[in-house]
Image (cartoon, grey):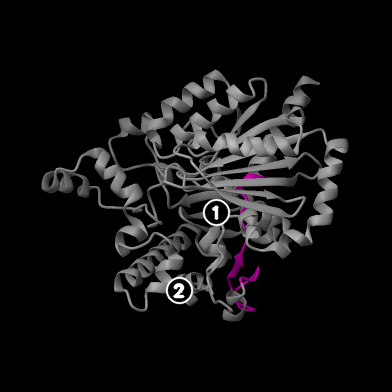
């Protein structure tokens, strides 16, 4: 049976009609009443390297997601548009042409505009992957912020140019509507200095070349969820968060503060991912330049789009495919083994950073839905107090560790869009407070 490992709560519900049906009455009431009782809506946009997710939240309290949409395979010959009316319990999928992220905006917003009055839209929140050294909090997008994002574009050419293009496209469509940038690097902004330093000439550090870390919106949400579900002692303890999806990283968190993370100056660092290499010997750059005449751009393309699981397996970047193939394909088996080995190795190093471990959280598409990957990563970590209950693990239970084990191992679905909406709502409230 294929594993369902959608990247978020919205995506998981797409393949489960009953999940949508179970919330239909409650959410339909919320959508209808939101036009009367709610001051408006917040729209969120979450752009990946080849995807764009969009959600509409009714402003509460509480914030309630009423619509969600996603475009996948942007830049490929045929992109896929998925539209979910959370309130009505309907889901529609269709292919669309989307050579660039901006091509995805029109079909997404046309659908949203059919559902709600755009005059009721209060603000648009964007996931912006890199905030550089300057931004540690969500920012109302201004010409000054845009200039800084353009300056930062070389930091992350895989994401920032497309995100800037989205902001500009939305600005032309809704020129009077506030837009807010929510930065993936913000969660790690207070990492200890020693964890941010790169061992290269100091002048580069002064120019902002340091370890930043990413997946911060996901990690911020997971820590809030850890507190919300009644585990405040865990949230204030020693935690490893594992966001495992197409992009994968780990973070070491103590007392709510990020102490270290696997990604570095760019999201290419750390674990091997679907098509990203993760950490490499920097000597490879000169070696491949001398032996193959490889240019900087070719190297960049290789480590971001041709490496990781795809590069090692030579067949697929999707762990589902590789798990199915590993019994008869040694390359697929090695790709899976490498992914699990590197995750386990990073966990061990983070336990050293934390001085022990109280809670391990799996999230992201793979982390939430692949019991076999969780099991393989945790295998051999019993000496740290990590012991899985395989029956719980096989059902993706909320807690998958054995009763009485020293480390609580949890599975928590992440929700970056919810975190964006909450951040935008807080910023709007703060501005209203200052205005008052």
The residue positioned 43% from the left and 52% from the top of the image is: 262
Q: Is residue 55 above or below residue 327?
A: above
Residue extending furthest toward the left: 291
Residue 123 picture location, percent across and down = 69, 30
Q: CA distance from mark 1 to mark 2?
A: 23 Å
The residue positioned 43% from the left and 63% from the top of the image is: 343
**In what element is the residue under mark 2?**
helix
In the picture of the structure, the residue carrying the numbered disc 1 is 253
1 and 2 marks in contact (CB < 8 Å):
no
Using the image, tell me which numbered label, if any, was put on residue 174.
none
Residue 333 in magenta?
Answer: no
Residue 333 picture location, percent across and down = 35, 72
The magenta segment: 396-418
Question: Does residue 209 show up?
Answer: yes
Residue 142 picture location, percent across and down = 58, 21
Residue count near mark 1 (Cα–Cα under 10 Å), binned few <14, some 14–19, many ≥20: many
In the picture of the structure, the residue carrying the numbered disc 2 is 376
What is the quadrant of the C terminus in the image? Answer: top right
First of labels 1, 2 by sequence position: 1
The one of 355 and 404 positioned closer to us in this rendering: 404
Q: Is residue 134 above or below residue 45?
A: above
**In what element is the residue under mark 1?**
strand
When asked about the image quadrant of residue 434, the answer is: top right
Residue 34 picture location, percent across and down = 83, 40
Locate residue 424 relative to residue 101 in the image: left or right: right
Locate residue 115 relative to residue 239 in the image: left or right: right
Name the dominant secondary structure of the magenta segment: loop
The residue positioned 42% from the left and 71% from the top of the image is: 323
Locate residue 40 relative to residue 423 in the image: left or right: right
Locate residue 39 relative to residue 309 in the image: left or right: right
What is the quadrant of the N terminus in the image? Answer: bottom right
Residue 397 in magenta?
Answer: yes
């Amino acid at each position: 049976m294929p594993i369902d490992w959608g990247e978020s709560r919205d995506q998981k519900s797409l393949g489960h009609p009953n999940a949508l049906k179970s919330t239909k009455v409650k959410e339909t009431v919320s959508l209808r009443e939101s036009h009367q009782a709610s001051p408006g809506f917040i729209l969120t946009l979450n752009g990946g390297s080849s995807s764009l997710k969009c959600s509409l939240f009714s402003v509460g309290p509480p914030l309630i997601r009423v619509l969600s949409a996603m475009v996948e395979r942007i830049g490929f010959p045929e992109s896929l548009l998925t539209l979910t009316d959370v309130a009505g319990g309907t889901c529609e999928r269709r292919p669309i042409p989307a050579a660039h992220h901006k091509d995805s905006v029109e079909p997404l917003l046309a659908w949203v505009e059919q559902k709600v009055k755009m005059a009721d839209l209060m603000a648009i929140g964007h996931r912006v992957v890199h905030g550089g050294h300057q931004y540690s909090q969500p920012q109302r997008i201004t010409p000054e912020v845009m200039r800084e994002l353009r300056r930062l574009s070389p930091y992350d050419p895989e994401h920032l140019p497309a995100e800037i293009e989205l902001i500009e496209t939305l600005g032309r469509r809704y020129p009077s509507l506030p837009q807010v940038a929510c930065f993936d690097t913000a969660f790690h902004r207070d990492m200890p200095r020693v964890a941010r330093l790169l061992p290269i000439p100091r002048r580069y550090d002064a120019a902002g070349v340091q370890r930043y870390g990413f997946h911060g919106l996901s990690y911020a949400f997971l820590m809030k969820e850890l507190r919300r579900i009644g585990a405040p002692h865990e949230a204030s303890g020693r935690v490893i968060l594992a966001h495992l999806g197409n992009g994968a990283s780990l973070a070491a968190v103590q007392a709510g503060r990020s102490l270290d993370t696997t990604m570095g100056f760019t999201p290419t660092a750390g674990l091997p991912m679907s098509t990203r290499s993760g950490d490499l010997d920097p000597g490879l750059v000169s070696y491949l330049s001398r032996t193959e005449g490889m240019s900087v751009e070719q190297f960049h393309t290789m480590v971001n789009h041709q490496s990781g699981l795809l590069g090692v397996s030579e067949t697929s970047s999707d762990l589902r495919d590789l798990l199915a193939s590993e019994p008869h394909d040694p390359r697929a088996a090695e790709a899976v083994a490498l992914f699990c080995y590197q995750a386990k190795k990073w966990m061990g190093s983070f336990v050293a950073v934390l001085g022990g471990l109280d809670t391990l959280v799996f999230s992201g598409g793979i982390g939430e839905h692949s019991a076999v990957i969780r099991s393989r990563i945790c295998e051999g970590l019993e000496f740290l107090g990590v012991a899985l209950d395989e029956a719980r693990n096989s059902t993706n239970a909320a807690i998958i560790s054995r009763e009485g084990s020293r480390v609580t191992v949890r599975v928590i679905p992440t929700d970056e869009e919810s975190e964006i909406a909450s951040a935008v709502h807080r910023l709007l409230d703060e501005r209203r407070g200052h205005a008052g």
